Image (spheres, helix red, strand yellow):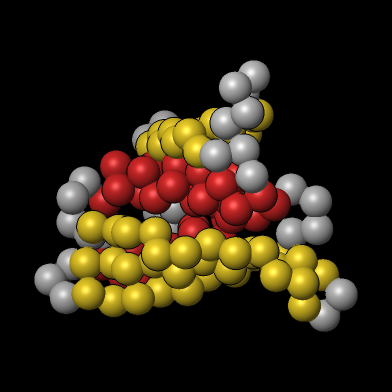
């Protein structure tokens, strides 16, 4: 058997989202780079559509910051679900700092699971950037 090639991008492994009895929401995201090396982020937010999207996106940012071990600092600037071309697209904007600031934007086509779409949009925004900076050897 040959060894599988090493990934230079993070893999979306697990996502949990729940509405709490208090009306707030909680999100948990698990990412993986190498087999057996996972990074988990969690966040709580307001129980509105915007709050739910932001909660899921923030949990993903936390998992990403663990994965890069301080090499890149990320800040979620905004997240929004928009209707375009008869579908719902979740769009995120982030600022990434690794010596210089760089703004990245990601999106994900998501009809029904909008919080999960927000998490994947963050990963889509950052994966190539982080793969080039951090996960190449």
Task: Establish if 96 lies above or below 123.
Answer: below
- Residue 25 quadrant: top right
Residue 57 is at least partly visible in this image = yes
For image coordinates 62% across by 34% down, the residue present is 17
For image coordinates 77% across by 77% down, the residue present is 84
Q: Nearer the viewer, residue 126 or 110?
A: 110
Q: Which residue occupies the extreme right position in the image?
A: 86
- Residue 13 quadrant: top right
Q: Nearer the viewer, residue 14 or 18?
A: 18
Task: Establish if 48 lies above or below 131.
Answer: above
Q: Nearer the viewer, residue 10 or 93?
A: 93
For image coordinates 38% across by 42% down, the residue present is 63
Task: Establish if 18 lies above or below 137.
Answer: above
Image side of residue 73 versus residue 48, left or right: left
Name the image quarter holding the C terminus.
Answer: bottom left
Residue 64 % position (x, y): 36, 49
Residue 39 % position (x, y): 38, 37
Image side of residue 89 versus residue 120, left or right: right
Q: Which residue occupies the extreme top position in the image?
A: 21
């Amino acid at each position: 058997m040959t060894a599988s090639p090493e990934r230079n991008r993070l893999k979306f492994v697990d996502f949990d989202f729940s509405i709490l009895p208090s009306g707030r929401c909680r999100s948990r995201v698990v990412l993986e780079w190498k087999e057996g090396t996972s990074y988990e982020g969690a966040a709580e937010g307001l129980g509105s559509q915007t709050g739910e999207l932001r909660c899921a996106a923030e949990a993903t940012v936390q998992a990403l910051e663990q994965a890069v071990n301080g090499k890149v600092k990320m800040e979620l600037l905004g997240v929004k679900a928009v209707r375009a071309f008869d579908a719902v697209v979740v769009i995120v904007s982030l600022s990434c700092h690794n010596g210089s600031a760089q703004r990245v934007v990601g999106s994900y086509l998501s009809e029904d699971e909008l919080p999960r779409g927000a998490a994947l949009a963050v990963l889509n925004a950052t994966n190539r950037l982080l793969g080039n900076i951090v996960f190449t050897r």
